[in-house]
Amino acid sequence: MNLFKSKKKFSFFILFMVNIFLLYKIFDEKSGLPAYQELQEKIEAVQVKIDEMDMRNRQVSSEIRVLKKDDRYIERLVKRELFYLSDNELMYIMK
């Protein structure tokens, strides 16, 4: 009976030490909850960047499709960006 009590105390002590170790690991700055929260914030920031890049990618893809199909759009774009004129147009420069 005495042997059983000492095993019980030893088991209790081991479980207690394991719990203390686990609590330490939970609140440890390098591998615990603070590190997890920091990683979550980084993940959210990267996800925002991914969403922005995805939206920009869709815009560029849409513009590419329009450029491939619509010659009048290309003409308007060249006129606006490079200040080109058609044969029957005049440019007035006002200062």
Image (cartoon, rainbow, N blue to C red):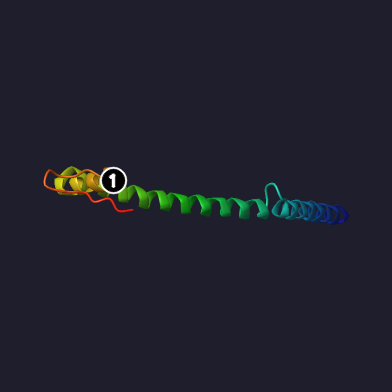
Task: Tell me how many marks there are.
Answer: 1
User: Observer-nearest residue: 73 or 22?
Assistant: 73
Q: For this view, does 11 lie left or right of residue 57? A: right
Q: Secondary structure at mark 1?
A: helix
Q: Which amino acid is tagged 1?
A: Glu
Q: What residue sits right under mark 1 in the picture?
A: 81
Residue lying furthest left in this view?
88
Pinpoint residue 15: horizontal percent, then vertical percent.
76, 54
User: Observer-nearest residue: 68 or 36?
Assistant: 68
Pinpoint residue 1: horizontal percent, then vertical percent.
85, 56
Pinpoint residue 9: horizontal percent, then vertical percent.
84, 55
Pinpoint residue 58: horizontal percent, then vertical percent.
31, 50
Name which quarter of the figure residue 86 lies in. Answer: top left
User: Observer-nearest residue: 93 or 77?
Assistant: 93
Q: Residues within 10 Å of mark 1 (few under 14, many from 20)?
A: few
Q: Residue at x 52, y 53 (%)?
A: 45
Residue lying furthest right in this view?
2
Residue lying furthest front in this view?
95
Q: For this view, does 37 lie left or right of residue 79? A: right
Q: For this view, does 54 lie left or right of residue 2? A: left
Q: Residue at x 65, y 51 (%)?
A: 35
